[in-house]
Every structure is written in C-alpha cells, then in structure tokens.
Image (cartoon, rainbow, N blue to C red):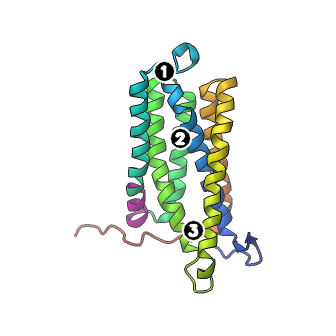
C-alpha cells in the first residue's frame, strides 16, 4: 500500500473510500440492472427476445440465483480470510462479475444464462463480503474510529445510487434495442468500476489473509 496524500479527502474521509465507493456503486449498478430485466428475459417468447421459459420455472430460477448470491458471500469471506486477503478477493471477484455479464450479453440461450449467472453469483459474493471489510479497515485507528459510522453511511449511498440507476438504464436499452444490450450495459458498468478501482488500488490496505491455510506436513 502506497501512502496517499493526506490532503486528499472524500467528503472528509480517507481518499481510499472513494475507490471502494465506486467499485460498489458500479457492481450494484450491474447487479440490479441485470436483475431488473432477468425475469422477463426468461419468460418472454423468442419472438420478443426472451427464452420462452414457463413463468413459474422462471421465478424459481431467479429465486435460486438470488439465494446463491447470498450463499456465495460465505465462499468470498473464506477466500479473503484463508487465501487471498480482502483486497485481492475483491478485485478478482469484480472480474468474475464482469465476465458473467459479458457472457449474458454475447451468448444467447440457456448456455449464456447458466454460465453468466454462475459467474455473477460467485463474484458478487466476493465483492459483497470484501468491500465492507475493507471500508472497516480504513477506520481502525483511534483517530479514525469516530468517523466510522459516517464512512459506512457514505459507502451505502453507493449501493442505493447504483441500485437506482441500473434498472433504469438496462430497462431502457432492453425496450429499445433488446435484452443483450441491457446485459451489455451491466458489463460496461462493471468494467468502469474495475477501471476506477484499478486507479486507486495501490492506496488500499493490501493485508494478507489473516488466517491462511497451512500446508500439510
């Protein structure tokens, strides 16, 4: 971790919060943007650009996907704790999320759906578990602890902003150009978030895995 200029602040908070704010904003943009058109993509007919799946089955697929996202936070936390550390887990997970959206955008049919949703679910769990942990690490010193709650409040704004604009953008693109353009917008959003994250990554805490796996003797 390089030492950032202490004069640079993000709403009165460490400049590193800006990096985490933007990766979370764009990950949520892509997540909720894709999810906003996923259900209708499943049950719309092929003529309408969808997969023509029965609505009941489509609802089950969406529900299973949503549940797997939250279950994957367990895997994400384990990877951060035992293998990669939070920063590297966050970066790798973001790439996996972007890959999932790209697969949805460019591969038609059930194969694109399956591989895309698996990647997004796995990656989202890593982002979700690691980003919050890294925000907390910015406020560990006695000097910064009084700002901790305000820092998390700013961070959670990113979730709301991304979650608000994502479905609007993807929904408009789906309506005017088709589903795969909406999925493509989600991929572009995640790519932009990773680009922003890469710019500030050197200033983030690069702590090793706190409880690494030990080689068997």
Quarter placement of the C terminus? bottom left
Secondary structure found at label 3:
helix
Determine which of the numbered discs, if any, sits on residue 99 in the image. Answer: 2
Magenta-colored segment: predominant secondary structure: helix
Task: Tell me which segment is drawn in magenta.
Answer: 75-83
Q: Nearer the viewer, mark 2 or mark 1?
A: 1
Bin the neighbour count of mark 3 within 10 Å (Cα to Cα): few under 14, some 14-19, many 20 and up: many
Q: Give the mark nearest the N terminus, 3 or 2.
A: 2
- Horizontal arrangement in the rendering, residue 133 relative to residue 192 (left or right): left
Bin the neighbour count of mark 2 within 10 Å (Cα to Cα): few under 14, some 14-19, many 20 and up: many
Instruction: Answer whether residue 1 is visible to the viewer in this image.
Output: no
Q: Position of residue 111 (x, y in %)?
A: 44, 27
Q: Position of residue 28 (x, y in %)?
A: 59, 49
- Horizontal arrangement in the rendering, residue 107 relative to residue 57 (left or right): right
From the viewer's side, name the closer residue of 210 and 51.
51
Q: Nearer the viewer, mark 3 or mark 2?
A: 3
Q: Is residue 36 above or below residue 150?
A: above
- Horizontal arrangement in the rendering, residue 162 relative to residue 66 (left or right): right
Residue located beneath label 3 in the image: 135
From the viewer's side, name the closer residue of 93 and 158.
158
Q: Position of residue 80 (x, y in %)?
A: 43, 63
Q: Give the mark nearest the N terminus, 3 or 1.
A: 1
> Distance from label 3 to label 1 (Cα)?
40 Å
Q: Give the mark nearest the N terminus, 2 or 1.
A: 1
Determine which of the numbered discs, if any, sits on residue 51 in the image. Answer: 1
Determine which of the numbered discs, if any, sits on residue 128 in the image. Answer: none
């Amino acid at each position: 971790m390089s030492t950032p200029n202490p004069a640079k602040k993000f709403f009165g908070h460490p400049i590193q919060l800006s990096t985490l704010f933007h990766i979370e904003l764009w990950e949520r943009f892509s997540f909720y943007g894709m999810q906003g058109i996923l259900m209708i993509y499943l049950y719309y007919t092929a003529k309408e650009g969808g997969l023509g799946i029965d609505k009941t089955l489509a609802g089950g697929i969406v529900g299973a996907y949503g549940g797997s996202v939250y279950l994957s936070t367990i895997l994400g936390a384990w990877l951060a704790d035992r293998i990669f550390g939070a920063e590297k887990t966050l970066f790798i997970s973001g790439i996996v999320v972007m890959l999932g959206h790209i697969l949805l955008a460019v591969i038609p049919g059930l194969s694109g759906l399956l591989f895309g949703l698996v990647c997004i679910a796995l990656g989202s769990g890593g982002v979700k578990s690691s980003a919050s942990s890294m925000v907390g690490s910015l406020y560990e010193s006695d000097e910064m602890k009084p700002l901790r709650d305000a820092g998390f409040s700013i961070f959670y704004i990113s979730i709301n902003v991304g979650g608000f604009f994502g479905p609007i953008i993807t929904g408009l693109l789906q309506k005017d150009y088709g589903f795969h353009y909406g999925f493509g917008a989600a991929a572009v959003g995640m790519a932009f978030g990773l680009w922003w994250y890469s710019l500030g990554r050197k200033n983030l805490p690069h702590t090793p895995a706190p409880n690494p796996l030990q080689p068997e003797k």
